[in-house]
Image: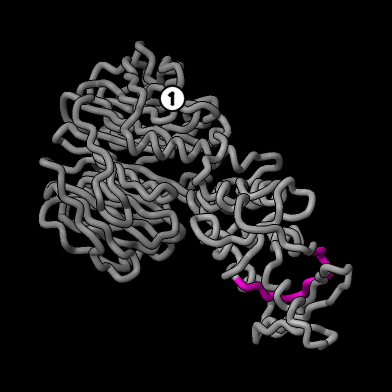
Amino acid sequence: MSASTPNSPPRRLRDLVHSLPFRSRRHSISSAAVLNTESVVVGGEGDGYNNREVKGGPVKRTVRKLMRRASLSFRPGEKSSFVVTGRRGRSRTLMGDGESGIVLDDKDEGDSYYAEMAKRVDPVTVLPTEITAQILSYLDHMSLVQCESVSRRWREAASNRHVWRQVFRNEHGPWESRPGKNWKQMFQVNHALHASWNRHDMNIKYLKGHTDAVYCVQFDENKVITGSRDRTIRVWDIKTGECQRVLKAPDDDSESHANEFHTASVLCLQFDDQILVTGSSDHSVIVWSLPSYKPIGRLLAHRAGVLDVCFDDKHIISCSKDTTICIWDRHTRKLLRQLKGHRGPVNAVAVRSNQIVSASGDALVKLWDIETGECLREFKGHHRGLACVQFSEDAKTIVSGGNDQDIKIWDAKTGECLRTLSGHKDLVRTLHLDCLNRRIISGSYDATVKVWHLDTGKKLLDITQYHSTWILAAKADYKRIVSTSQDSRTLVLDFSAKIKGIEVLEQ
């Protein structure tokens, strides 16, 4: 951090008028310490700074905001106390009523001096460490940085890893918590990553190997898996771009191998740590064991091409050009039920909890109960056939797109269309919903990939120059977009390539 300038808030704070002729020490606090936020002292004995009264500027606003949080962090109606030592070494215990906000001298000697001292106590010195951390966790990251520049004690309090963990979660959503994580560094790296997205600063890489259109894709931190019209499934190293594995029937075309591999275009796929599920124009769904990539089951019930697949812990869902949706037991791979109701090809499905959402060429989005097979709701608003649908992780939001070139955001509970996103000039072929980062990624037959803000509908990014023809699939995570096209290439856009320390997020 650069040295503060003469006019910077920390410097103004440290250089203000006079030192207060008292020191405070923590005695006991059981409820709300009553502090006047109009005249707050920061710093303390041994800090290397003199006690100064905050008169104005950003630091004052930050401190006052912190003090207001302090009063909200305790139980009203209980008393609190702390000791103030005066000019002549005399001490007074000041009692506070957390409900009325009145400070009383327990000696009741009418000496207003001690009451004045109570108004000018450094909260970091007075409050227990746990309470200070709780209060600071309500601040945004810019306010925390200002707090760190006040004094040594404030710097220590504002650098607390528990504070930064909460600030990280407040601004970037939930994140897996593991011992030893440097939450402040994670915040800094994630902040730089968001800036990279905003600047459109990305590294570009093509994965080349398929010989025909690439219909589907999914990826994680280590690999990309793609399916193609060339009847193969390819597994790629996401960092090097190297093709590590090709899943296809052997060249001898024997009967036994034909039952294990797809014999037509691979149209859809999804994987997790245990299985890979793929669907094909050959009317079948194949379940593969991971990490061996050995086929362990072939699901046969559809009478036409399988257009999309998804799964959860208990079920595998497939949909087809035959207008039906099949629900399979993930573990036994038995067909549990078949959903009928769409009047056109069912092009996309998604599952959350006990509900399935589907999108069809009949221009309808439908919500189904996975256990009963009942259609719970229809979403009407598109005026042409639908190609894609997404279901938020909390099962509250549905996003759909199709041949009318629009993207619609729906309330899953009420069926209300919350927002329509317009900007594509051809069929919206693929959607990805990133709830954590509040982004929608869309790909279209207009050869563009667009990024939208989920809450405002604002277009954040327009990727126009990297594919030469139809976009068939697009997925994203917190740092990458991966898209596929009819041109047989898979495009990886990495917004983290130039960010130092990105591995703290990858872990």
The reply to whether residue 88 is in sight is yes
Q: Nearer the viewer, residue 167 or 480?
A: 167
Quadrant housing residue 397: bottom left
Residue on which the image places disc 1: 497
Front residue of 125 and 5:
5
Q: Is residue 381 left or right of residue 499?
A: left
Relative image position of residue 460 (x, y in whole percent): 27, 43
Q: For residue 463, which quarter of the picture?
A: top left
Q: Residue at x 75, y 59 (%)?
A: 125
Figure disc tally: 1
Q: Main secondary structure of the magenta part?
A: loop
Per the image, label 1 sits on a secondary structure element best described as loop
The location of residue 235, given as percent across then percent down, is 42, 22
Instruction: Tell me the crowding category of disc 1: few under 14, some 14 to 19, or many 20 or more residues within 10 angstroms, Cα based.
Output: some
Q: Mark 1 belongs to which amino acid?
A: Ala
What residue range appears in magenta?
24-36
Q: Is residue 210 above or below residue 402?
A: above
Name the residue located 59 percent from the left edge and 46 percent from the top edge: 176
Report the residue at 14% width, 50% height from top. 385
> Is 173 displayed left or right of 350 in the figure?
right
The picture places residue 257, in percent across and down from the top left corner, at 40, 21
Q: Nearer the viewer, residue 452 or 167?
A: 167
The answer to if 26 sits in the magenta stretch is yes
Quarter of the N terminus within the rendering = top right
Left or right of 33 on screen, residue 211:
left
Q: Where, by quadrant of the figure, is residue 492 drawn?
A: top left
Q: Kindly give the residue lying farthest to the top in the view shown.
A: 252
Identity of the residue drawn at 62% across and 73% down: 36
Residue 360 makes an appearance in the image: no
